[in-house]
Image (cartoon, grey):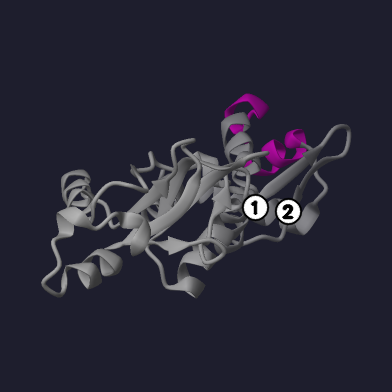
Amino acid sequence: MELTARQEQIIEIVKENGPITGENIADQLNLTRATLRPDLAILTMAGFLDARPRVGYFFTGKTGTELLTEKLKKITVKEFQSIPVVVNENVSVYDAITTMFLEDVGTLFVVNEKSLLVGVLSRKDLLRASIGKQDLADIPVHIIMTRMPNITYCEKDDLLIEAAQQLIEKQIDSLPVILKKDEGLEVVGRITKTNMTKVLVNLVRDELH
């Protein structure tokens, strides 16, 4: 977020004199309170200033980078999750490869007849199964998939930064977003490296505007 010269002046005044009322800030800048109100609102919403009733404005002491970090730490998985691509555990490896290609994804989530998560298929899993002379149309994916307890997942209310950490630590491309039920885990979304890129782009775009 790029501040105007006047907004920079306001911050300096509040740094030196805070807590200070809006009227006093306006007086120092030879402006009316109404003229100053939009700038004070922007600086308060952005987190540079804080305001207390009957006390006035004071400087939070936070830099733009710190404020950006704070925003990132508050974002949850559900705000950026995308639609999961699932296949049944009994479909063939050939069909799974076709689905991955048509859906343009790097990971498939495998479910049972109750639509509950039982496995994960990565590009590497499917590539590994393709090497050899076996007929891929005859091999069900449940033979080659990664199973519990080796599946890393997240929930919609988890912090997005924690999901990103999982992607890095496990060296995987995607996490299923699950809803815990008595009978098992229902897949309700996915978090990918692409989702994380969108988060960063959106945050930077917000800062620029």
Q: Which mark is residue 23?
A: none
Check if residue 26 falls in the magenta segment: yes
**Nearer-the-camera pick, 156 or 179:** 179
The amino acid type found where label 2 is placed reads Phe
Q: Is disc 2 placed on a helix, strand or loop?
A: strand
Which residue appears at 51% of the width and 74% of the height? 169
- In which image quadrant can residue 140 be found? bottom left
- In which image quadrant can residue 51 be found? top right
Quarter of the image with the C terminus is top left
Kindly give the residue lying farthest to the right in the view shown: 54
Position of residue 124 measured from the top left corner of the image (x, y, whole percent): 27, 69
Position of residue 202 measured from the top left corner of the image (x, y, whole percent): 41, 47
The residue tagged 1 is 11
Between the residue at mark 2 and the residue at mark 1, the CA separation in whole angstroms equals 7 Å
Check if residue 186 falls in the magenta segment: no
- In which image quadrant can residue 130 be found? bottom left
User: Closer to the camera: disc 2 or disc 1?
Assistant: 2
Contact flag, marks 2 and 1 (Cβ < 8 Å): yes
Q: Is disc 1 placed on a helix, strand or loop?
A: helix
Q: Is residue 101 left or right of residue 121?
A: left
Q: Earlier in the sequence, mark 2 or mark 1?
A: 1
The residue tagged 2 is 59
Crowding near pointer 1: few (<14 within 10 Å), some, many (20+)? many
Q: Is residue 60 left or right of residue 127?
A: right
Q: Is residue 56 above or below residue 204?
A: above
Task: Give the extent of the magenta segment.
Answer: 22-36
The amino acid type found where label 1 is placed reads Ile
Position of residue 111 measured from the top left corner of the image (x, y, whole percent): 43, 44
* Type of secondary structure dominating the magenta stretch: helix
